[in-house]
Every structure is written in C-alpha cells, then in structure tokens.
Image (cartoon, helix red, strand yellow):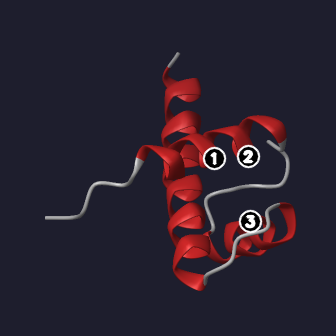
C-alpha cells in the first residue's frame, strides 16, 4: 500500500497544473524540472512528491476530459 499524500502537496500541485497547463505532462522527469523552476522547494523529497502528484493529477485530468 502507498502512503497518503498531505493535503498541502495536493493543493500546490493542483494550483501549478491549473496555472501552467502547457508546462506539465505525463512525464515525471519533465514535471520535476518544472516544479523546480516554478517553486522555491527546499528539499529533493518535497520536489519529488510534488512532481509525482502533478504527474498523477495530470493523467487523471486528461483521462476525465477524454471520457467526457
């Protein structure tokens, strides 16, 4: 089982995807690069958590758009 992400990670990731929809995609490494550029994240772990949730959120969002 995976761990549950804190709500602050989810909130920041959703805001990034909504503000910069053209920057993010389903690729973790690309998202990691953009999270680093667009935020002032202090630790590598926090950056990776944000990039991971951005990737997941982006994929789910695209899947929902395609099915609608």
- Residues marked 1 and 2 touching at CB (< 8 Å): yes
Q: Which residue is labeled 1 in the image?
A: 12
Pick the front one: 66 or 51: 51
Left or right for 17, reference 64: right
**Location of residue 36 in the rendering, given as x and y in whole percent from the top left corner:** 77, 73
Is 48 on the left or on the right of 23, as rendered? left
Q: Secondary structure at mark 2?
A: helix
Q: The N terminus is located in which quarter? A: bottom left
Question: Where residue 22 appears, x then y in whole percent?
Answer: 85, 47
Q: Which residue, given by chain and number where applicable, does mark 2 sit on?
A: 16
**Among numbered discs 3 and 1, the one appearing first in the sequence:** 1
Given the current orientation, which residue lies at the most extreme top position?
A: 68
**Residue at screen point 79% across, 62% down:** 39
Residue at the farthest left position: 1
Within 10 angstroms of label 3, few (less than 14), some, or many (20 or more) residues?
many
Q: CA distance from mark 3 to mark 2?
A: 8 Å
- Residue 35 disc label: 3
The relative height of residue 68 versus residue 15 in the rendered view (above or below) is above
Q: Residue at x 28, y 54 (%)?
A: 4
């Amino acid at each position: 089982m995976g761990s549950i992400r804190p709500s602050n990670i989810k909130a920041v990731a959703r805001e990034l995807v909504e503000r910069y929809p053209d920057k993010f995609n389903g690729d973790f490494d690309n998202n990691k690069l953009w999270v680093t550029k667009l935020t002032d994240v202090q630790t590598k772990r926090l950056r990776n958590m944000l990039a991971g949730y951005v990737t997941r959120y982006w994929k789910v969002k695209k899947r929902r758009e395609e099915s609608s």
